[in-house]
């Protein structure tokens, strides 16, 4: 490599790292939507895990889908008969959700809004709040749980999934078995807070919040929810087919809480 090439490579490397360090859900929205809509086993499994936590018939039920992204779960809830509003702070995600709704109407509505302070959702206006892989993106969990409590009717339910925090702790990685046994390598589980993956083709390059499992459960209880169920479903055959090392670990945690 001559000096000119070296300088070019150095400049490219620095600008690539800078781009990675400033990615947000809005800047990766087009990439994410393409991934979800071309048949992602993990995303469809995550959707099904959450849907399994809800009744098959949602006729007459009002639902807020918090952190709806491009509407994968929102559409499914509407097709079960629910009156669903999906909110997400990323205008680009909401744009994709609305375009999909126009192309194939399900009845779902969408708004750009923050899950920790939803200005577009009235107090006591929904029977259900769903949050698929989104609470781990909200910086202030207590504010989000308070907001969920505000919009739910008494007796309403919050059902959410998050990447399983025990195995998806900051910078957890796969060992492929060269120098260590094959499996998941997890570093500091106790290091709560914001972290950003350096994987240039991973969703967590947009950054996310790591919290211990107990933090989620405690926050729900502290804000007047009764925990009704906690589940750690085994990955389905498609997920394992794509990534055999996932066979022995639950990728997602599902929690259901009743608003007192
Ligand atoms: C992994 S995507 C999940 C999208 C969708 N729920 C699904 O299952 O396909 C995470 C979403 O959380 C959203 N998000 C980030 N911060 C948020 C916040 N403060 N309130 C609500 N959603 C947020 C992101 O914009 C992104 O669309």
Image: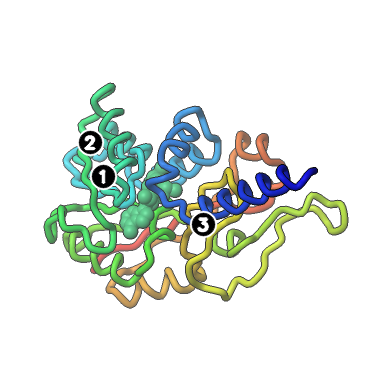
Question: In the rendered image, which residue does mark 3 sit on?
Answer: 21
Q: Are marks 1 and 2 in contact (CB under 8 Å)?
A: yes
Tell me where residue 224 sits by quadrant.
Answer: bottom left
The quadrant the C terminus occupies is bottom left
x and y, in percent, of residue 49 in the image = 46, 45
Residue 148 or residue 27, whichever sits in front: 27
Q: Earlier in the sequence, mark 3 or mark 2?
A: 3
Which mark identifies residue 33?
Answer: none
Q: How is the image coloured?
A: rainbow
Callout 3: few (<14), some (14-19), or many (20+) C-alpha neighbours within 10 Å? some
Residue 190 position (above or below residue 50): below
Secondary structure category for the residue under label 3: helix
Residue that badge 1 annotates: 86
- Picture coordinates of residue 42, whole percent (x, y): 54, 41
Answer with the quarter of the image where residue 1 lies.
Answer: top right
- Packing grade of label 2 (10 A; few <14, some 14-19, many >=20) is many
Tag of residue 108 = 2
Residue 25 against residue 218 in the figure, above or below: above
Would you say 134 lies left or right of 63 here?
right
Residue 53 visible, this orientation: no
How many residues crowd mark 1 within 10 Å: few (<14), some (14–19), many (20+)? many
Labels 1 and 2: the sequence-earlier one:
1
Q: Between 177 and 158, which is closer to the camera in this rendering? A: 177
């Amino acid at each position: 490599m001559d000096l000119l090439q070296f300088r070019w490579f150095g400049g490219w490397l620095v600008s690539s790292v800078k781009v990675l360090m400033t990615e947000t859900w809005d800047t990766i929205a087009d990439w994410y939507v393409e991934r979800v809509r071309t048949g992602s086993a993990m995303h469809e499994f995550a959707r099904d895990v959450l849907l399994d936590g809800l009744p098959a018939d949602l006729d007459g039920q009002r639902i807020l889908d918090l952190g709806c992204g491009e509407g994968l779960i929102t559409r499914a809830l509407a097709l079960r008969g629910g009156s669903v509003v999906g909110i997400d702070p990323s205008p680009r995600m909401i744009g994709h959700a609305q375009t999909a709704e126009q192309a194939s109407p399900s009845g779902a509505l969408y708004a750009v809004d923050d899950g920790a302070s939803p200005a577009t959702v009235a107090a006591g206006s929904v029977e259900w709040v769903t949050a698929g892989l989104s609470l781990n993106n909200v910086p202030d969990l207590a504010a989000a749980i308070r907001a969920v409590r505000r919009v739910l009717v008494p007796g309403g339910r919050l059902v959410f999934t998050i990447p399983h925090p025990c195995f998806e702790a900051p910078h957890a990685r796969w060992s492929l078995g060269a120098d260590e046994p094959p499996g998941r390598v997890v570093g500091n589980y106790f290091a709560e807070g914001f972290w950003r993956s350096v994987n240039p083709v991973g969703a967590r390059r947009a950054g996310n919040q790591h919290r211990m499992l107990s933090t989620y459960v405690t926050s729900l209880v502290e804000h007047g929810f009764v925990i009704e169920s906690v589940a750690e479903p085994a990955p389905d055959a498609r997920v394992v087919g794509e990534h055999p090392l996932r066979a022995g670990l639950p990728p997602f945690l599902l929690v259901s809480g009743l608003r007192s």
